[in-house]
Image (cartoon, rainbow, N blue to C red):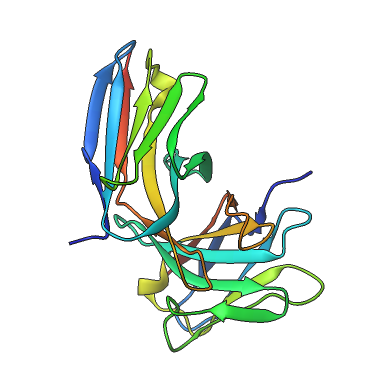
Amino acid sequence: NAGVMQNPRHLVRRRGQEARLRCSPMKGHSHVYWYRQLPEEGLKFMVYLQKENIIDESGMPKERFSAEFPKEGPSILRIQQVVRGDSAAYFCASSRDRLNTEAFFGQGTRLTVV
Amino acid sequence: KNEVEQSPQNLTAQEGEFITINCSYSVGISALHWLQQHPGGGIVSLFMLSSGKKKHGRLIATINIQEKHSSLHITASHPRDSAVYICAAMESGGATNKLIFGTGTLLAVQP
């Protein structure tokens, strides 16, 4: 049973490009959380998704950021027109359901905007 | 003031020492997590607890719900324990069960 898989591990984008970060939850997990860790800062919640639904996106910047978790395939965090301030580590965590609160984290995607 | 506070922020210990990291929180929680992160590495969940005490190898985690306080202890510390330890509170109520993180404790265990 593979753990939470995130790819790519490292991503370099020029200012203005788009970044797409992927998260495949553990087998049997239908709940996905995205967190962002800015340099020298702690982790912050971004968005919580279940299959095909965004449940809570209160931590997502209002512009340029979007997330999805389709019926088939990984969850995608998409950042359009990236800026230097988007450089951070983005972590995904999955759980089996909301009541089973054990969450398993991926290795993260480290985004660098140049 | 952060909703989840950790202390100390930095901790240096000699190999073999007993280590304690503290976490206080101000929100109502359904569970509290202790996480480990190596520099540039991923995040590993060490414990999830909602009451009492849990032990895994040389690691022990305790929580006092009334006092809103948790501690992570490492016995017989080893240089490979060097990492950032993060306390994260799972806020109760609502539909999300999102985690609120402390800023982490950077532990360095010297041989």
Q: Going 38% across and 44% down the picture, which residue do you hit?
A: B86
Residue B22, x across and y down, in percent: 27, 37
Q: Is residue B93 above or below residue B53?
A: below
Task: State the residue lying farthest toward the front.
Answer: B66
Q: Is residue A25 above or below residue B15?
A: below
The quadrant of the rendering that contains the C terminus of chain A is bottom left
Q: Going 40% across and 16% down the picture, which residue do you hit?
A: B78
Residue A47, x across and y down, in percent: 52, 73
Q: Going 37% across and 55% down the picture, which residue do you hit?
A: B101
Residue B10, x across and y down, in percent: 22, 36
- In this view, the residue in front, B61 or A20, is B61
Task: State the residue lying farthest toward the left.
Answer: B1
Q: Count numbered badges in the picture.
A: 0
Q: Residue A29 sits in which quadrant?
A: bottom right
Q: Is residue A15 above or below residue B77?
A: below
Q: Residue A7 sits in which quadrant?
A: bottom right
- In this view, the residue in front, A98 or A76, is A98
Residue B65, x across and y down, in percent: 34, 46
Q: Going 30% across and 23% down the picture, which residue do you hit?
A: B19
Task: State the residue lying farthest toward the bottom.
Answer: A63
Horizontal relation, residue B103 to residue A22: left or right: left
- In this view, the residue in front, B24 or B41, is B24
Horizontal relation, residue A40 to residue A54: left or right: left
Q: Is residue B63 above or below residue A16?
A: above
The quadrant of the rendering that contains the N terminus of chain A is top right
